[in-house]
């Protein structure tokens, strides 16, 4: 029996199309229940975000360990690459209890060794991740603020030294949506599943590019308040 291969790009496109269909349906449904008094029940707006995360790229750390010089050195930070920083830009369409967010995220895991004597050693593990997320809002208190939970899919482009890999990854997140006039701030916790494999065709050896881990971030946007109830 032959096994049918799965096209990851086609699967991602199908997931995105399904989410868009759900959001359009919900948008039409909620538009029939607009609140009185001129309160907005939908909004479309851009935003930016920053964050930091923990991960364990074991093959990356083994590579660094094997390529370090044997003489005296000082290291900056932890003994292994376990921290990364990220920035993102996003576009969100919000309709009361739910939003759909398209984003592009860039993350970098830096590592610096100060070699004495000799040249300093720099290593950088990169990730570029466009994707599509959906979040669901649960009003708290008066309804001005809300808790939100959600997730979605991202397509990760990762590279380290001469190693490169692409893969579909999935993201889960939860946080608070705090609305102060037109200013919205969203601190959140997230978990990303992102692991690709670089394969050397000449030697048949593989190298894992693993960005799986959790992160703490904050998103900021400026837009008219959207009713949470």
Image (spheres, grey):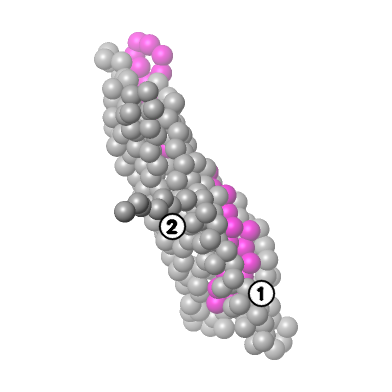
Question: Would residue 92 be counted in the magenta stretch?
Answer: yes
Query: For the point 59% across and 67% down, which residue is it?
Result: 20
Quadrant of residue 198 within the rendered picture:
top left
Q: For the residue labelled by badge 2, is the local secondary structure a helix, a strand or a loop? A: strand
Q: Which mark is residue 42?
A: 1
Which residue is most to the front?
A: 1
Where is mark 2, residue-wise?
171
The foreground one among 77 and 58 is 58
**Highlighted magenta segment, given as a residue range:** 91-120
The answer to which quarter of the image holds residue 31 is bottom right
Q: Main secondary structure of the magenta part?
A: strand
**Real-space Cα separation, disc 1 to disc 2, in angstroms:** 24 Å
Residue found 71% across the figure and 87% down from its top: 37
Given residues 158 and 76, the one toward you in this image is 158
Front disc: 1 or 2: 2
- Decide if residue 175 is in sight here: no
Please count the marks in the image. Answer: 2
Please say if 79 is above or below 84. Answer: above
- Position in image of residue 99 (x %, y %): 57, 69
Query: Quadrant where the N terminus lies?
Result: bottom left
Tell me the residue at 54%/67% (across/down).
18
Q: Position of residue 15 (x, y in %)?
A: 51, 62
The spot of residue 179 in percent (x, y) is: 58, 70
Residue 228: mark: none
User: Tag 1, which secondary structure?
Assistant: loop
Tell whether label 2 touches label 1 (CB within 8 Å): no
- Quadrant where the C terminus lies? bottom right
Q: Is residue 193 above or below residue 99?
A: above
Using residue 142 as the reference point, say whether residue 27 is left or right of it. right
């Amino acid at each position: 029996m032959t096994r049918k291969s799965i096209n990851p790009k086609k699967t991602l496109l199908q997931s995105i199309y399904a989410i868009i269909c759900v959001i359009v349906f919900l948008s039409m449904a909620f538009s029939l229940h607009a609140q009185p008094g001129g309160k907005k029940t939908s909004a479309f707006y851009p935003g930016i975000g920053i964050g930091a995360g923990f991960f364990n790229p074991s093959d990356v750390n083994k590579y660094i360990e094997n390529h370090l010089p044997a003489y005296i050195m000082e290291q900056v930070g932890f003994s292994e690459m376990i921290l990364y920083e990220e920035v993102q830009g996003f576009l969100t369409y919000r309709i009361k209890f739910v939003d759909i967010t398209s984003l592009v995220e860039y993350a970098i895991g830096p590592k610096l060794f100060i070699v004495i004597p000799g040249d300093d050693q720099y290593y950088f593990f990169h990730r570029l991740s466009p994707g599509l997320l959906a979040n669901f809002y649960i009003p708290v208190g008066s309804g001005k603020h809300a808790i939100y939970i959600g997730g979605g899919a991202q397509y990760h482009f990762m590279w380290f030294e001469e190693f490169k890999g692409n893969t579909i990854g999935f993201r889960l997140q939860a946080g608070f949506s705090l609305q102060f006039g037109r200013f919205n701030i969203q601190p959140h916790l997230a978990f990303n599943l992102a692991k690709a494999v670089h394969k050397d065709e000449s030697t048949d050896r593989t190298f894992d590019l693993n960005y799986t881990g959790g992160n703490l971030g904050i998103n900021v946007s400026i837009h008219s308040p959207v009713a949470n109830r």
